[in-house]
Image: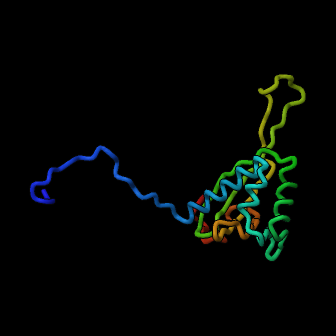
Amino acid sequence: MRGRPGASVRESTQAVPRAKVRTVSQENIDLVLAGYQAFLAGDFDVLSDLLDEEVEWYGPEAGDREVARRETVLELLADRLDGLPRVVLERCVAAGDRVVVYFRASEVEADPTDDRPLQTRRSYTIGRYAGVITIRGGKVVRIQDYPHVHAALDAVGLAGEFS
């Protein structure tokens, strides 16, 4: 036993504190998830705080810039929220300062010939969205749309990593 001569040994019943290590990639995923939840809740104050003043949003075609600046992006998101179908975030993968997101939009359709309220509903996919969100200094600085998730994964160097 080491220590000072004559010193008694005491056992601690408290857990040893462990450092909480968070990677930048995990912080970026958390930021994107907070933005996703705020969008679905219609909380544009939170969204505004997450977006850089000079944020840019590019469409799926090379060089196809849809909007620039925070206020314009917020307006576009507000337009998309109006009449939004059910949206599910299927994938959120970080690659450094970029996060790949993949959403599926679906709707529920009732059979008009059946009067049972729930038994005849079916859900169907109406669209998919893939994008890469770039984050710097805790703010979204760029959003790039892609035609499919494989193109988005390829853009961040993760082609073939996920199926």
Residue pushed farthest top?
Answer: 116
Q: Quadrant of the N terminus?
A: bottom left
Which quadrant does the C terminus fall into?
bottom right
**How many numbered marks appear?**
0
State the residue lying farthest toward the bottom: 63
Colouring convention used in this rendered image of the protein = rainbow
Q: Position of residue 97 (x, y in %)?
A: 61, 69
Q: Residue at x 61, y 68 (%)?
A: 159
Residue 90 at x, y percent in the picture: 66, 51
Horizontal arrangement in the rendering, residue 9 relative to residue 32 (left or right): left
In the foreground, 123 or 25: 25
The quadrant holding residue 76 is bottom right
Toward the right, the furthest residue is 112
Q: Which quadrant would residue 19 be assigned to in this image?
A: bottom left
Q: Residue at x 23, y 46 (%)?
A: 11
Q: Residue at x 79, y 49 (%)?
A: 42
What residue is at 76 percent from the left and 64 percent from the top? 147
